[in-house]
Amino acid sequence: MRHSFSKISSLFAAIAFMGVASMPASAAEFNTEQKQEIESIISDYLLENPDLIRQVFTILSQQEAEKQKQAELERAKLAQQALVENQEELFNAKDQIVLGNPKGDVTLVEFLDYNCGYCKQAFGSMLELMDSDKNLRVVLKEWPILGPQSQEAALVAVGVTKVAPEKYWDFHKAMMTMRGTANKESALRVAEKLDIPREELEKLYEDTDTRKPIMDAYRLADALNLNGTPGYVLGDEVIPGYIALEAFESKIANLRSCGSTSC
């Protein structure tokens, strides 16, 4: 790469030495003839040395990749700090939904949206995890980021936790496996099939307290730098997206053996 910069330096030294003997203080002061001459020199030089263009693009790509890497490291650092600062609300909020073993030794927090295809894909992994690991505690955070219809379904879901918490798991399973768009009406139909009073859910739908867990989830997800559903918190790690069942199992095993998802 040093060779490339040497060529570039030589090029501009040649420009300075040529008919542009009295070099202006700034580019704006070049006259039209001087600009045309410089452009011609640069164009000819680059055409004669195409490798130089590729090398410059490689350098720029590497610099951009390094910037992105540093930005990601900074975001991860901030997310880790937010995890520590919000542990109690993440794992033990008063109005949160807890599945699996309420007294489990490992807690997995999931941020979800009922219209999220990846959430539905991940639901199979959640079922397998809870079925095979009887000491896993799962906390769900309603985080409806895919539009007004998702927000409607989330409000009904929160209502179910208040009206019939013992039926929430069945409601959740039905919502995660249903076809079509999740919205207020489809969520209410699912609830009715489980004999959850529609009129009570309708009342809670307009209650500001019903919105609180959802607003809390928005705030937490923002602090954790989650940018899409599903998003997870497992032990000391923020997981910004769907991962395979085997990856979850490995991280959970690590938590139990050394207290961190990456021993």
Image: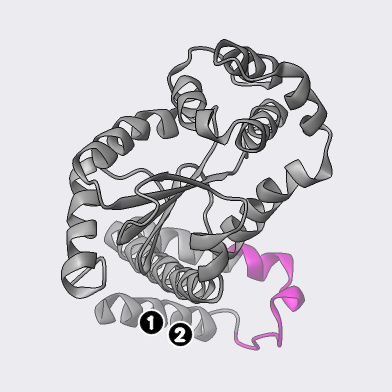
Q: Does the CB distance between marks 1 and 2 fall below 8 Å? A: yes
Q: Which residues are magenta?
A: 21-36
> Residue 102 in the image: x percent, y percent?
40, 52
Depth check: give the residue in front, 78 or 157.
157
Q: Is residue 71 magenta?
A: no
Mark number displayed over residue 10: 1
Depth check: give the residue in front, 69 or 157.
157
The residue located at (52%, 55%) in the rendering is 226
Could you say whether the residue bearing mark 2 is in a helix, strand or loop? Answer: helix
Mark 1 crowd level (few <14, some 14–19, many ≥20, 10 Å Cα):
few
Q: CA distance from mark 1 to mark 2?
A: 5 Å
User: For this view, does 9 lie left or right of residue 185?
Assistant: left
The residue located at (47%, 80%) in the rendering is 12
Residue 122, by quadrant, is top left
The residue located at (47%, 20%) in the rendering is 174
Depth check: give the residue in front, 202 or 77.
202
Which amino acid, by three-letter code, is at mark 2? Answer: Ala
The residue located at (44%, 69%) in the rendering is 76
Depth check: give the residue in front, 62 or 28.
62
User: For this view, does 95 lie left or right of residue 229?
Assistant: right
Which amino acid, by three-letter code, is at mark 1? Answer: Ser
Residue 118, by quadrant, is top left
Quadrant, the C terminus: bottom left
Mark number displayed over residue 13: 2
> Residue 107 in the image: x percent, y percent?
37, 57
Could you say whether the residue bearing mark 1 is in a helix, strand or loop? Answer: helix
